[in-house]
Structures are given as structure tokens and as C-alpha cells.
């Protein structure tokens, strides 16, 4: 517990297992400093996933003392005797491994420990320390999942993300933990690394969809699994903290390293570092990523629809015998003010209620998929038609402020559009939507600026508008609001009939 251990004091950077073993030794009254001083370490064979054990050599009065810890099946295989109160007796591997399996099945992480006294000359034989050892016992450690882990895994499952546990622990331990986390369905598979290696490539490809846990896995097997899932066209995120995890972290589409307990090598190999070492943070990152992507789509939807409306109004007006409804300075106003402020505020929109209930996007999916380009097209045509309709009405009635009214309808229709597309699928009136004070401020502020622009004053003169009264502006506000029920109807059709499902 003390000698085959790299932890020192309360070293937070040491391996958690080493810290736990040192704490156990001290709880039993061991003086770690005195023991280490009496038996200085002279050599070691560090832990490796392939060997599943660690062995250290220490100076002793009668030669050398070899200490080993590791997987029970590996340690038992190198032991001849068992330390008992009445003296050493021949080891019964079956009984020891049965006890180890019982502990593992209860969810404990099981380590075996052993020792051997050697002559000094044996230091030149690397394998001598791991032969003919004296079995000292089993240590059962509990590493309970964080309370939020089960909920986080349930959320990822709802979001279409499949979690696979790769661990060096015993298969029974891994199964018990996976069961506690709610990861295992009746037809899911739990395999060990050697079992996975024994499969032919076609057989391995066949089990991947059902594979949920790989126990006693090695770094090479982790890398092979990442590549196998990628070969199926899946986007793979890999979490890890050790040096041995670095190849898989580097190869994965998204490598996620632990910031607290992880090694520098793992952090360098990863693309993302968790500062709190909490899997729930990964789920929050997925949610945030989906929110950001949705907001990019909102911005594109808003800006392109508004710009298309401008183009339609300006291009079609001469073709139908109308004067051009917008002057260059007015178009510049719309692009800078009406497009700019609400467009920026849409970037602060909260995630939709169902954001974590959607399947992941295909790797090559276009930004314009799922009806975005259709929405831009018909909303742009609607805004253009409203603008041209008001212009035609004003010209026919010889209204001096016809251009001001057409300009107002165009600008206000875009503001209504911004309020309607806060959610892509849900209704803008859904009470589950969190308020966006930035968008509210942008809409109210832009509408106020638009009102000032059509009233007598410096803005009206700058934009070369004919002032209109408050009643005319209210009429423009009401007419442009047609955009809202039109967009709500589209979203209703999307929810009810799966409109644009194929993008």
C-alpha cells in the first residue's frame, strides 16, 4: 500500500487510486514516511494497460523487496503462496479470483497486492520480481458516479448521442457501474478488450451498434474503437485523462481531456479540456453548441429574408410600373439599423425547449437544410409583396408619403419577423421560451428609431422622407404584423406534418 505507490502526502496531482491506498495504510496505523525511509525505491516497472500491474523494487536488510499491485487475475498468476496469520500457505487461485469477482460484481474496483523478497543479484533479472510472489490480499475501492452523471447520460441518450464506457476495470465492475448509470439496455453488450481483439473485423463491425462497455481495455483498443466508429460514419468524442489516452484523444473528432486529474499529455492531445472533470459539463457544452448553431441559423434566416424582400421591392417595382420605393440612403438605413440590431440580439437567444431532444446533425448537412432556404424565399417574397402593395396603394391615391409608408412597412416587417423566429419549431408564444431582453430592447429601440425617422426632424431629412402621422405609422405597424401569423402557420405545419423534414 505504501511502497508500490507514487502518492506523497495529500498530493492532489497523484493518481486517485494511489491516494486512496495511502490513506488506507495510514488508517491502519502505518507510518508512510518511516516505511519509505527504511525501504528506498531502487527500481520500478510502471503500470501499463497491457500489463495491468505495477511493480517496484526496494532496498531491504536481507536484499530486495519487490511489491506489486494490479488486476487480480494478473497478480494471482504470479503468486505461489498466500500470507495467512499462521504462516504462508499455497495459493488457491480459484478462490481468490472468485472473491475478486464478487467484489467487482458489487461495483467495487478491485486491486490485488503481493510481495517477494529477493537477493540483490536478482535486480538484474527484470522478471524475477514478478515470479513466485506472496499474495497479501485484495483491496476494494468504490468510485461512485457523480450524482449528475446518470441524468447527464440520460440527456445524451435523448439527444441521440450514444455513450460507450472504455475502462481498465474488471468487466463485472464496469457492468455494475454502467447498470447504476442506466447505460445498459437488455440487448447491450459488455465485452473485455481480449474478447474484442478475438473478433474478426466483420464480427467487430456487427457488434459496434450494441457495444456499451469495454472492460480491461488497452490504449490500442481505445484507438481502434475510435477508428471503427468513425469508419461507420459516426462523429466520435473521446474523453480521457492519462498518457495512454492521448492517441485516441488525438484521433477522435472531439478529444475531451480532464483539466484537474488529467495529464499534460492528454490535455495537449485533446481539443477540449474540462476544468471541472465532470461529464455533465460535456452535456452542457453540447447544449450550448446546438444553441449557437441554431442562433447562426436564426441570424441567416432573418438577414437573408429581409434582404430578399428589399431586392424584390426594388427590382419588381419598375417592372410593374411603379417608381422605385426605396432610395439608396433608405436601403442603407435598413441594412445598418433594422438588420443590424435585431440580428445581433438573435445571437443571444436561449436554446429551444427541445434542443436536447433532437438527433445530431449529419456531418455534411447544409446550413440551409430543414426548410431554411424555403423560409427565406417565401418570407422574403411576403415582405417584398407587402412593400410593393403599400407603394402601389400610395401611388394610386397620390399620397405624398407613399414612399415613407412603403419604407416603414419594409422595416417593421423585418422586426416582426425577428420576433417570430425566436424559435425554429416552437411557437414564439410558447411559455417555455426564456425571455431574451436583448432582442426586446433591440426591437423596441429599432421601432422607436423608425418612428423618429418618419416624423419631422433630422432623421427624416437625412433619409429624404415625407413625414407621416402617428395613425399612418400605426397602420404600417399593423400591416407588417402579417408576417407573424404567416410564420406561425409555417411552424405549425412543421410540427404537425413534418414539413421540410428532408431539408
Image (tube, rainbow, N blue to C red):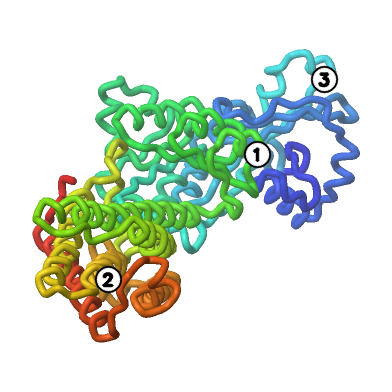
Whichever of callouts 2 and 1 sits on the residue coming sooner in the sequence is: 1
Q: 396 left or right of 466?
A: left
| Residue located at (87% from left, 46% from top) | 33
Nearer the N terminus, badge 3 or badge 1? Answer: 3
- Is the residue under label 1 in contact with that under label 3 (CB below 8 Å)? no
| In this picture, residue 94 sits left or right of residue 275 | left
The image quarter containing residue 76 is top right
**Residue at screen point 21% across, 80% down:** 475
- The alpha-carbon separation of the residues under discs 2 and 1 comes to 65 Å
Q: Callout 3 environment at 10 Å: few (<14), some (14 to 19), or many (20+)?
A: few
Look at the picture and state if 190 lies above or below 320. above
**Helix, strand or loop status at disc 3:** loop
Q: CA distance from mark 3 to mark 1?
A: 36 Å
Q: Position of residue 452 (x, y in %)?
A: 39, 77
* Relative to 453, 2 lies left or right: right
SS category of the residue bearing label 1: loop
- Image quarter of residue 436: bottom left
Left or right: 36 with respect to 189? Answer: right
Measure the C-alpha gap from mark 2 to mark 3: 101 Å
Closer to us: 368 or 138: 368
Disc ID at residue 263: 1
Q: Which residue is at the front of the view, 298 or 307?
A: 307
Give the x, y percent position of residue 389: 13, 66
Q: Nearer the viewer, residue 228 or 54?
A: 228
Q: Is residue 226 above or below residue 358?
A: above
Which residue is denoted by mark 3 in the rendering? 119
Specify which label sits upstream in the sequence, 2 or 3: 3
Q: How many C-alpha atoms fall within 10 Å of the one at disc 1: few (<14), some, or many (≥20)?
A: some
What residue did someone put label 2 on? 404
Q: Nearer the viewer, mark 2 or mark 3?
A: 2
Query: Is residue 387 visible to us here?
Result: yes
Amino acid at each position: 500500500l505504501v511502497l508500490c505507490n507514487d502518492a506523497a502526502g495529500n498530493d492532489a496531482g497523484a493518481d486517485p487510486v494511489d491516494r486512496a491506498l495511502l490513506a488506507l495504510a495510514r488508517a491502519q496505523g502505518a507510518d508512510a514516511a518511516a516505511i519509505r525511509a527504511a525501504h528506498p525505491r531502487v527500481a520500478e516497472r510502471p503500470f501499463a494497460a497491457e500489463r495491468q500491474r505495477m511493480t517496484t523494487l526496494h532496498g531491504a536488510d536481507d536484499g530486495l523487496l519487490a511489491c506489486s499491485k494490479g488486476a487480480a487475475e494478473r497478480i494471482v498468476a504470479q503468486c505461489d503462496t498466500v500470507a495467512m496469520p499462521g504462516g504462508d500457505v499455497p495459493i488457491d487461485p480459484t478462490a481468490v479470483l472468485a472473491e475478486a469477482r464478487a467484489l467487482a460484481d458489487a461495483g467495487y474496483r478491485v486491486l490485488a497486492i503481493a510481495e517477494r523478497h529477493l537477493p540483490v543479484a536478482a535486480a538484474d533479472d527484470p522478471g524475477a520480481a514478478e515470479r513466485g510472489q506472496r499474495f497479501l490480499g485484495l483491496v476494494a475501492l468504490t468510485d461512485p458516479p457523480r450524482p449528475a452523471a446518470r441524468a447527464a447520460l440520460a440527456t445524451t441518450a435523448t439527444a441521440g448521442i450514444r455513450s460507450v464506457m472504455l475502462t481498465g476495470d474488471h468487466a463485472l465492475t464496469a457492468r455494475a457501474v454502467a447498470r447504476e448509470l442506466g447505460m445498459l439496455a437488455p440487448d447491450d453488450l459488455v465485452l473485455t478488450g481480449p474478447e474484442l481483439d478475438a473478433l474478426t473485423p466483420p464480427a467487430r463491425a456487427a457488434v459496434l451498434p450494441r457495444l456499451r462497455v469495454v472492460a480491461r481495455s488497452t490504449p490500442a483498443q481505445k484507438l481502434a474503437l475510435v477508428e471503427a466508429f468513425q469508419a461507420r460514419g459516426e462523429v466520435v468524442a473521446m474523453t480521457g485523462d492519462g498518457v495512454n489516452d492521448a492517441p485516441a484523444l488525438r484521433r477522435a473528432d472531439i478529444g475531451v481531456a480532464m483539466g484537474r486529474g488529467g495529464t499534460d499529455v492528454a490535455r495537449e492531445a485533446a481539443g477540449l479540456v474540462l476544468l471541472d472533470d465532470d461529464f455533465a459539463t460535456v452535456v452542457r457544452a453540447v447544449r450550448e453548441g446546438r444553441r449557437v448553431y441554431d442562433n447562426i441559423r436564426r441570424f441567416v434566416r432573418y438577414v437573408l429574408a429581409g434582404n430578399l424582400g428589399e431586392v424584390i421591392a426594388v427590382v419588381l417595382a419598375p417592372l410593374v410600373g411603379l417608381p422605385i420605393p426605396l432610395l439608396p440612403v433608405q436601403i442603407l438605413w435598413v441594412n445598418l439599423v433594422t438588420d443590424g440590431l435585431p440580428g445581433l440580439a438573435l445571437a443571444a437567444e436561449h436554446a429551444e425547449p427541445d434542443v436536447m431532444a433532437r438527433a445530431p446533425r449529419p456531418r455534411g448537412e447544409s446550413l440551409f437544410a430543414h426548410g431554411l432556404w424555403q423560409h427565406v424565399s417565401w418570407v422574403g417574397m411576403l415582405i417584398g409583396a407587402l412593400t410593393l402593395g403599400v407603394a402601389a396603394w400610395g401611388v394610386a391615391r397620390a399620397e405624398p408619403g407613399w414612399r415613407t409608408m412603403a419604407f416603414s412597412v419594409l422595416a417593421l416587417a423585418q422586426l416582426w419577423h425577428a420576433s417570430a423566429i425566436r424559435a425554429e419549431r416552437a411557437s414564439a408564444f410558447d411559455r417555455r421560451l426564456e425571455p431574451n431582453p436583448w432582442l426586446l430592447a433591440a426591437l423596441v429601440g429599432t421601432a422607436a428609431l423608425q418612428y423618429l425617422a418618419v416624423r419631422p426632424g433630422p432623421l427624416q431629412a437625412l433619409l429624404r422622407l415625407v413625414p407621416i402621422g402617428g395613425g399612418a405609422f400605426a397602420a404600417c405597424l399593423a400591416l407588417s404584423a402579417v408576417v407573424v401569423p404567416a410564420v406561425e402557420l409555417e411552424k405549425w405545419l412543421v410540427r404537425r406534418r413534418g414539413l421540410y423534414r428532408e431539408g
